[in-house]
Image (cartoon, rainbow, N blue to C red):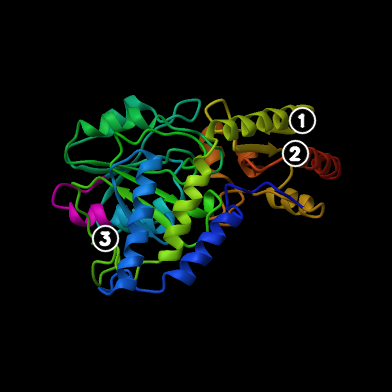
C-alpha cells in the first residue's frame, strides 16, 4: 500500500497508542474528583498541558476539544457571542476550511457581516486589502496558516500585526495543517486551532490555544472541567496521547522537514513530463502538500484508478463536500478546468522515495489510460 493522504489524517504512532493505553489502564480516576486517583489524573493532564506549551513555546491557555472542527466553532461562535456589543464584522480568507465557513455562515444568518480578503497572484493574503477591510466593528479575523488543499503558507505574523492595531478585534488562525510540520510564529495570534490526528496522534482530540486575557462564550456548558470554556469529563488518555504525539512530531524537526522537501521536489520532477498535468501548489506551499490538475480527468476518476494499484490520494479536503470543483484551486488559478480536475498528494516524514516511485509508476499507467 502507498498512502499519500496524510493531510486528511495520519496513522497513530505506536508510541502514542502505548501512551493512550497506559493512561487508560493506570489513571482510572476522574481528573475532577478530589480523591487521590482524581488528583493523580489531574496531575497527568497538567503535565501534558505544560509539555504542549513548552513544545510550542507559548503561554496561551490550552483548551482541549474533540478536534479542529470543534476548536474552530468554539472560537468563532464564542468570540462573536461574547463581543457582539462591540460589532458584527468578521473577515476570513477564501481558503478557509469548511469548519470555518459553516459557523461563519451560521452567524451571517444572525446578523453578522462577513468579508473575504483578497489574494494576490500567488494566493497570499493581500495585506493592503486586509487593512482596507478592517473597521471599528470588526471583532474577528480568521485566516488559516496553511490551506489544506494547496498547502499555501500565509504571512500569519504580518496579518497579526495588522489586526493588533484594532484592540476590539481578535485574530484566530486554524493551524491544523502546520502544527508538527512547519514553524509558524504565534506571538501575534490570539487563538490557534489544531488536531492530534494530523501529526500521528489519536483521532478525537484537538486543542484551542487562547490568550489568557480573553474571555469567550463556551459551546458546551455544564461545569469547569480543565477549563471554563469546554465542559465535560476530561479525556485523559486522549490528552496524554496528544502531548506525546506533539513531542514526537517536533523531535528531529529540521531533518523531517528536509526529507519531505526532497520528496516533494522528486515528485514534481516526475510529473513534469505530462502535458495535461498542471501543478497548482507553488513556492509558497509547504512541501507536505502537492496539488495537481490532470486536465480532462475527473478527480474521483483518478482517485479510484490509483486505488486499483493500492495507491491512496485525495481530491479536495477530506471535510469538503462532493462538489467536483475545488474552490481553492479556482481562487488561486482562476481556471475552471484546473479546478474541476485537481487532486491532492500529501506526504509526510515517514513517506519513502520508494513509495513516491510506486505512485509515479501507478500514475503513469492511469494517465495513459484516462487522458
Q: Indicate left or right for 312 with 140 as reference.
A: right
Q: Residue, x 39% and y 47% (percent of image)?
A: 52
- The residues bearing labels 3 and 2 have C-alpha atoms spaced at a distance of 44 Å
Q: Residue, x 45% and y 62% (percent of image)?
A: 238
Q: Quick one: label 1 or label 3, which is nearer the N terminus?
A: 3
Q: Which mark is residue 227?
A: 3
Whether the magenta-drawn stretch holds residue 148 is answered as: no
Marks 2/1 in contact by CB < 8 Å: the verdict is: yes
User: Furthest residue to the front?
Assistant: 36
Label 3 Cα neighbours within 10 Å, binned few <14 / some 14-19 / many ≥20: some
Q: Tell me, yes or no, if residue 82 can be seen here.
A: yes
Q: Indicate left or right for 361 with 244 as reference.
A: right
Q: Which residues are magenta?
A: 78-89
Q: Which residue is mark 1?
A: 270
x, y percentage for residue 310?
78, 53
Q: Tell me which corner region of the image, top left, top right, bottom left or bottom right, holds residue 156.
A: top left
Q: Tell me, yes or no, if residue 12 can be seen here.
A: no
x, y percentage for residue 73?
35, 57
Q: Residue, x 26% and y 60% (percent of image)?
A: 227
**Which one is in front, 59 or 122?**
59
Label 2 Cα neighbours within 10 Å, binned few <14 / some 14-19 / many ≥20: many
Q: Quick one: label 3 or label 2, which is nearer the N terminus?
A: 3
**Discs 1/3, front:** 3
Q: Indicate left or right for 122 with 144 as reference.
A: right
Q: Which residue is mark 2?
A: 356
x, y percentage for residue 173?
37, 42
x, y percentage for residue 157?
34, 30
Amino acid at each position: 500500500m502507498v498512502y499519500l493522504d496524510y493531510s486528511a489524517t495520519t496513522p497513530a504512532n505506536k508510541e502514542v497508542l502505548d501512551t493512550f493505553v497506559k493512561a487508560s489502564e493506570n489513571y482510572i480516576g476522574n481528573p475532577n474528583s478530589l480523591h487521590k486517583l482524581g488528583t493523580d489524573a489531574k496531575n497527568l493532564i497538567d503535565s501534558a498541558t505544560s509539555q504542549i506549551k513548552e513544545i510550542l513555546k507559548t503561554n496561551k491557555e490550552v483548551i482541549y476539544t474533540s478536534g479542529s472542527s470543534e476548536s474552530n466553532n468554539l472560537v468563532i461562535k464564542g468570540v462573536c457571542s461574547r463581543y457582539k456589543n462591540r460589532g458584527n464584522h468578521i473577515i476570513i480568507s477564501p481558503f478557509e476550511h469548511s469548519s470555518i465557513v459553516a459557523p461563519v455562515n451560521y452567524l451571517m444568518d444572525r446578523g453578522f457581516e462577513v468579508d473575504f480578503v483578497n489574494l494576490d497572484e500567488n494566493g497570499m493574503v493581500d495585506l493592503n486589502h486586509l487593512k482596507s477591510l478592517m473597521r471599528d466593528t470588526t471583532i474577528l479575523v480568521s485566516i488559516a496558516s496553511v490551506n489544506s488543499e494547496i498547502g499555501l503558507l500565509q504571512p500569519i505574523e504580518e496579518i497579526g500585526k495588522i489586526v493588533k492595531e484594532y484592540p476590539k478585534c481578535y485574530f484566530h488562525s486554524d493551524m491544523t495543517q502546520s502544527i508538527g510540520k512547519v514553524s509558524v510564529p504565534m506571538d501575534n495570534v490570539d487563538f490557534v486551532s489544531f488536531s492530534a490526528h494530523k501529526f500521528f496522534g489519536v483521532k478525537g482530540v484537538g486543542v484551542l490555544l487562547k490568550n489568557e486575557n480573553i474571555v469567550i462564550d463556551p459551546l458546551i456548558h455544564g461545569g469547569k472541567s480543565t477549563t471554563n470554556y469546554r465542559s465535560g469529563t476530561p479525556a485523559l488518555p486522549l490528552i496524554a496521547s496528544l502531548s506525546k504525539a506533539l513531542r514526537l512530531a517536533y523531535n528531529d524537526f529540521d531533518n523531517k522537514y528536509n526529507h519531505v522537501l526532497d520528496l516533494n521536489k522528486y515528485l514534481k520532477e516526475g510529473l513534469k513530463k505530462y502535458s495535461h498535468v498542471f501543478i497548482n501548489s507553488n513556492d509558497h506551499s509547504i512541501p507536505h502538500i502537492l496539488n495537481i490538475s490532470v486536465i480532462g480527468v475527473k478527480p474521483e476518476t483518478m482517485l479510484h484508478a490509483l486505488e486499483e494499484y493500492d495507491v491512496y490520494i485525495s481530491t479536495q479536503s477530506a471535510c469538503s463536500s462532493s462538489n467536483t470543483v475545488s474552490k481553492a484551486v479556482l481562487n488561486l488559478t482562476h481556471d475552471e478546468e484546473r479546478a474541476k480536475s485537481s487532486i491532492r498528494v500529501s506526504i509526510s516524514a515517514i513517506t519513502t522515495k520508494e513509495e513516491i516511485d510506486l505512485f509515479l509508476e501507478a500514475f503513469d499507467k492511469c494517465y495513459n489510460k484516462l487522458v
